[in-house]
Image: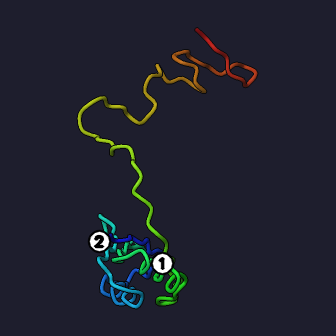
Amino acid sequence: MNTKLYVGNIPFSTTAQDLQDLFAQAGTVASVDLIFDKLTGRSRGFAFVAMTTGEEAQQAMQKLHGYSMDGRNISVNEARPKEDRPAPRSFEGGERRGFGGGGRSGGGHHGHRGERSERSERGGWDRRG
């Protein structure tokens, strides 16, 4: 059974072939999944590498954790199972909630809802109903 490793802090210019070649030093590489940003298409700086045995995965972690690639020290750890996350929110249909101040009536000064304010002779505000 393959053992999946998380490889973090890799340079953005790293290719899957670079990782394949590097991890081949520790054993047989079953697969390399370099993770890219969906919007920009640019590497996100991490990958998953599957080694064919647990022993090879342990050897890769010991040998390559802290290894310097283009001035960056990579981290190599056993990958954790993907956690269940809530389903993505859909913004189509359903209840609409606006952003903004709705729900208040009138304008007024300093939140005097619908009440008219006028300046008094003493310079302060005089509320008139």
Left or right: residue 104 versus residue 33 is right
The circle on residue 41 is: 2
Crowding at dot 2, Cα within 10 Å, few <14 / some 14-19 / many 20+, comes out as few
From the viewer's side, name the closer residue of 111 and 120.
Answer: 111
Q: Quadrant of the N terminus?
A: bottom left
Q: Which residue shows up at 38% across the image and 73% down it?
A: 47
Under circle 1, the secondary element is helix
| Residue at the image point whose x is 32% and y is 81% from the top | 29
Q: Which residue is mark 1?
A: 58
Compared to residue 91, the image places residue 73 above or below, namely below
Residue at the far left in the pictured view: 93
On residue 112, the disc is none
Is 122 located above or below residue 99 in the figure? above
Q: Quadrant of the C terminus?
A: top right
Picture layout, residue 44 above or below residue 70: above
Q: Position of residue 67 (x, y in %)?
A: 52, 87
Give the amino acid type for the residue marked by disc 2 in the picture.
Answer: Gly
| Separation of marks 1 and 2 at Cα, in angstroms | 31 Å
x and y percentages locating residue 78 in the rendered image: 46, 69
In the displayed structure, does residue 116 sit left or right of residue 24?
right
Q: How many marks?
A: 2
Horizontal arrangement in the rendering, residue 46 relative to residue 38 (left or right): right
- Three-letter amino acid code at the position of disc 1: Gln
Q: Nearer the viewer, residue 30 or 21?
A: 30
